[in-house]
Image (tube, helix red, strand yellow):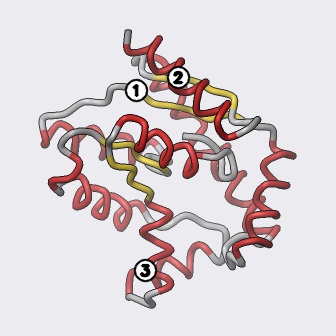
């Protein structure tokens, strides 16, 4: 977990390699559908262009389907999900149905000013239409309103590991691995 621009995608990929598990990014799945101009992609683009999140019903069904695939049986990292309390409830139900439970929840933290700068640079480098200044600010506001409060709930469940997302990529990865090792014992 963490706000947009905190490095979730980068770190999820690095951790998937480190632990030889699958990284599942809802953002990547949405972008692939947008690029492919699928019906889901068109629907997702309507929301992302306004800086809004794709509706839970679409996202939840997509995650449920992805977690039912064979390659996740040895473990997985979710990047960008859950984002709100309803998705936490749905994730709990999905995992319960599969006979699994969470080992931990990583929250990458970062200063808002740093996030805005990172996202503006990403938009410039990658040409991402969903990273306009207004859309970025709106997504950060939505994170603060809907997602950030979830960290308290995961903290109460003793699952939360908070890690500073600022610094060199390798340094952040090392901090995450050390924090997870301490969390998991």
Q: Contact (CB < 8 A) between labels 1 and 3?
A: no
Residue 26 locus on image (x, y percent) = 44, 60
Q: Quadrant of the N terminus?
A: top right
- Where does residue 131 sit, x and y in percent of width and height? 72, 70
Which of disc 2 and disc 3 is earlier in sequence? 3
Q: Is residue 67 or residue 180 the one in the foreground?
A: 180
Residue 102 relative to residue 133: left or right = left
What residue would you read off at disc 2? 161
CA separation in Å, label 1 and label 2: 7 Å
Real-space Cα distance between discs 3 and 2? 32 Å
Q: In this figure, which residue is indicated by the disc labeled 3?
A: 33
In percent of the image, x 21 and y 39: which residue is there?
Answer: 74
For label 1, the residue is 104
Q: Pick whichever of labels 1 and 3 is earlier in the sequence.
A: 3
The image shows residue 172 at horizontal and vertical percentages of 65, 32
Callout 1 touching callout 2 (CB < 8 Å):
yes
Residue 113 % position (x, y): 87, 46
Q: Residue at x 73, y 60 (%)?
A: 138
Position of residue 75 in the picture relative to residue 51 (left or right): left
Q: As displayed, is residue 46 above or below residue 96? A: below
């Amino acid at each position: 977990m963490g706000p947009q621009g905190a490095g979730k995608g980068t770190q999820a990929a690095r951790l998937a390699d480190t632990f030889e598990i699958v990284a599942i990014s809802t953002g990547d799945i949405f972008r692939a559908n947008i690029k492919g101009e699928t019906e889901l992609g068109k629907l997702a683009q309507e929301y992302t262009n306004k800086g809004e999140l794709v509706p839970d019903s679409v996202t939840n069904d997509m995650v449920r389907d992805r977690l039912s695939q064979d390659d996740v049986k040895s473990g997985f990292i979710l990047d960008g999900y859950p984002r709100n309390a309803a998705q936490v409830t749905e994730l709990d139900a999905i995992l319960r149905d599969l006979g699994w439970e969470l080992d931990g929840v990583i929250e990458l933290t970062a200063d808002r000013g740093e996030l805005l700068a990172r996202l503006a640079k990403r938009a410039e480098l990658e040409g991402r239409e969903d990273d306009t200044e207004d859309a970025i600010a709106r997504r950060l506001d939505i994170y603060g309103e809907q997602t950030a409060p979830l960290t308290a709930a995961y903290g109460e469940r003793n699952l939360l590991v908070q890690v500073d997302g600022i610094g060199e990529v390798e340094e952040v990865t090392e901090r995450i691995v050390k924090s997870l090792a301490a969390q998991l014992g």
